[in-house]
Amino acid sequence: TQLLEQSPQFLSIQEGENLTVYCNSSSVFSSLQWYRQEPGEGPVLLVTVVTGGEVKKLKRLTFQFGDARKDSSLHITAAQPGDTGLYLCAGNTGGGNKLTFGTGTQLKVEL
Amino acid sequence: NAGVTQTPKFQVLKTGQSMTLQCAQDMNHEYMSWYRQDPGMGLRLIHYSVGAGITDQGEVPNGYNVSRSTTEDFPLRLLSAAPSQTSVYFCASSRLRDRGYTFGSGTRLTVV
């Protein structure tokens, strides 16, 4: 059973468009992370959110952790071809380091 | 600073063969883990370790063994390879109090 569901699974947009990726669960997470993965490489950490309602910004990327700490979203403003990649959310349900990963959202940004 | 180094990058095995996937990190991270990544399944935890001499099972441990004799190294052993183990394997590490993982670049394994 997949604890973290991501939507959409695939997204193809034009440069300059905005987009939002969602990460949802029925479980409560003590923290949630977002990673981006490019072909042939391992995932790279983008952000960690730990407080319900928290909003973090990383240049054109905005991350939000739901008030109940069961969901999160990633919003990209004015997408660029360099944003192309697989976006993964990952949640921590306890006090340790074990993470459960979502199924991922494959984003393609075209010129 | 090399981060997390995985070897080999590619491997083809015959059913029934055994092999070891190597993982080494130079960041003095206490926590290390192995994941496999399959299409539509995301990353699934195989085994993890919170320090030298301590290992535990993850979500999909069957057919795999690990050991952690040093802080730096965390090898993953396939005992008798099966086609179902065809996947991309990632090693990751982190500090125990820091939830952000550093991943290696992966090993693509094909079992025929």
Image (cartoon, coloured by chain):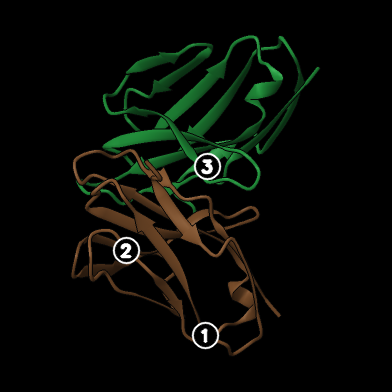
Chain colours: A green, B brown
Estimate how packed mark 2 is, as few (under 14), some (14 to 19) or many (20 or more) residues with alpha carbons within 10 Å. some
Q: Is residue A53 above or below residue B90?
A: above
Q: Is residue A49 above or below residue A19?
A: below
Estimate how packed mark 3 is, as few (under 14), some (14 to 19) or many (20 or more) residues with alpha carbons within 10 Å. some
Which three-letter amino acid code belongs to the residue tagged 3?
Glu
Q: Is residue A25 visible?
A: no
Residue at mark 1 shares a chain with residue at mark 3: no
The chain carrying label 3 is: A
- The C terminus of chain A: image quadrant: top right
Q: Secondary structure at mark 2?
A: loop
Q: Is residue A4 above or below residue B57?
A: above
In x, y percent, where is residue A102? 50, 44
Front residue (pair B104, A18): B104
Q: How many marks?
A: 3
Number of the label disc, if any, that sits on residue B73: 2
Which three-letter amino acid code belongs to the residue tagged 2?
Asp
Q: Secondary structure at mark 3?
A: strand
Q: Is residue A61 visible?
A: yes
In x, y percent, where is residue B64? 43, 77
Q: Quadrant of residue B100?
A: top left
Q: Which residue is mark 3?
A: A5
The chain carrying label 1 is: B
Which three-letter amino acid code belongs to the residue tagged 1?
Ser
- Disc 3 from disc 2: Cα separation: 32 Å
- Disc 1 from disc 3: Cα separation: 34 Å
Q: Secondary structure at mark 1?
A: loop
Query: Residue at image x 66%, y 39%?
Result: A9
> In screen coordinates, is A70 left or right of B71?
right
Going from N to C along the chain, the mark reached first, 1 or 2, is 1
Query: Residue at image x 42%, y 31%?
Result: A71
Number of the label disc, if any, that sits on residue B18: 1
